[in-house]
Amino acid sequence: MALIGAHMSIAGGLEKSIERGEALSCEAIQIFSKNQIQWRCAPLSQGRAERFFRAWGESSIESVVVHASYLINLAATDATGDRSIAALEDEIERCDLLGVDDLVLHPGSSRGRPAEEGLALAAERLGLVLGRTAHKRVSVLLETMAGQGDILGKDFRQLRRIFELLDWHPRLGLCLDTCHMFAAGFEMRTPASYERLLDEVEKTIGLDRVRCWHLNDSAHPLGRKLDRHANIGEGELGNAPFSFILNDPLWEDIPCILETPPDGHGYGRDLAILRKLRGG
Ligand SMILES: [Zn+2]
Ligand SMILES: [Zn+2]
């Protein structure tokens, strides 16, 4: 079965995310491993990492994924580029200490330059960080993006370019975000369109590289390139795509993470809908 869960806050300590996830009966959770809107952060102590690892081990949560800081832009040509290299290396070290195998990363933004240049720079720096952390098992999952402005990763051809430039590095994977793909123009609301989407992933990169799904409805219609997540069943996607994903044996043990607006109904209602769509 696909593992149903949601992005959890680490306020009050990393291990609090486990308690919060468990209270909502999550089978998987996603967290930031630190304050995601600050570059600087104290190193993760062995003690804090162990507290998290112990709480996770004693919980019913099967899988934890870390989402890298939104500040990281491996395609930046200014000082952000170097900072991003250091920050990504730090994210991988933190995942390693926490016992987390998968780190979700936005491919970056080429900020006014051609996408091909941005992809090349991002791939080069990603390769550098993967090399520096060669002794770690943490994989970097490139997330599909909505296609807003110069943000990279709006289609599988762009993402494939990074895989190619890194010689299909074994520690590279994919995170498919339903809202982002729909915003970028990928239809998935019928069985046939869902199959076409999977064909596209298989043809360009390979379904075996998909290690995480982000299950978000979209507030905006197909192809508008606008990244605004909606609660499940309250956006333009409807329930069908989530039903296809959660009942597809391809996603056995793959974390399917909600990043829906936590205000209003909270995650509880979205999680209940997903469980119902999966049949329990
Ligand atoms: Zn993301
Ligand atoms: Zn996402």
Image (cartoon, rainbow, N blue to C red):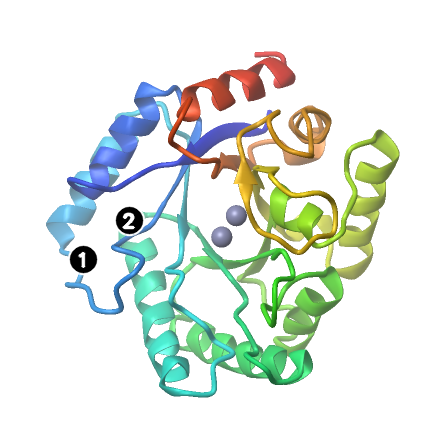
Disc 1 vs disc 2: Cβ atoms closer than 8 Å?
yes
For image coordinates 46% across by 80% down, the residue present is 128
Which residue position is annotated with label 2?
Answer: 98
For image coordinates 59% across by 80% down, the residue present is 118
- The correct choice, above or below, for 78 with respect to 193 in the image is below
Residue 162 screen position, x and y as percent: 63, 72
Q: State the residue in front, 1 or 192.
A: 192
Q: Which mark is residue 177?
A: none
Residue 46 screen position, x and y as percent: 14, 53
For image coordinates 32% across by 76% down, the residue present is 86
Which residue position is annotated with label 1?
Answer: 44
**Helix, strand, or loop for circle 1?**
loop
Q: State the residue in front, 38 or 280.
A: 38
Residue 45's quadrant in the figure? bottom left
Gap between marks 1 and 2, in whole Å?
A: 9 Å
Q: Quadrant of the N terminus?
A: top right
Amino acid type of disc 2?
Leu
Residue 161's quadrant in the figure? bottom right
- The correct choice, above or below, for 149 with respect to 142 in the image is below
Dot 2 alpha-carbon crowd within 10 angstroms: few under 14, some 14 to 19, many 20 or more:
many
Tell whether 194 sits left or right of 219.
Answer: right
Mark 1 C-beta to ligand 1 under 8 Å: no
Amino acid type of disc 1?
Leu
Residue 261 screen position, x and y as percent: 44, 35
For image coordinates 25% across by 40% down, the residue present is 53
- The correct choice, above or below, for 115 with respect to 212 in the image is below
Residue 237 screen position, x and y as percent: 69, 33
**Helix, strand, or loop for circle 2?**
helix
Dot 1 alpha-carbon crowd within 10 angstroms: few under 14, some 14 to 19, many 20 or more:
some
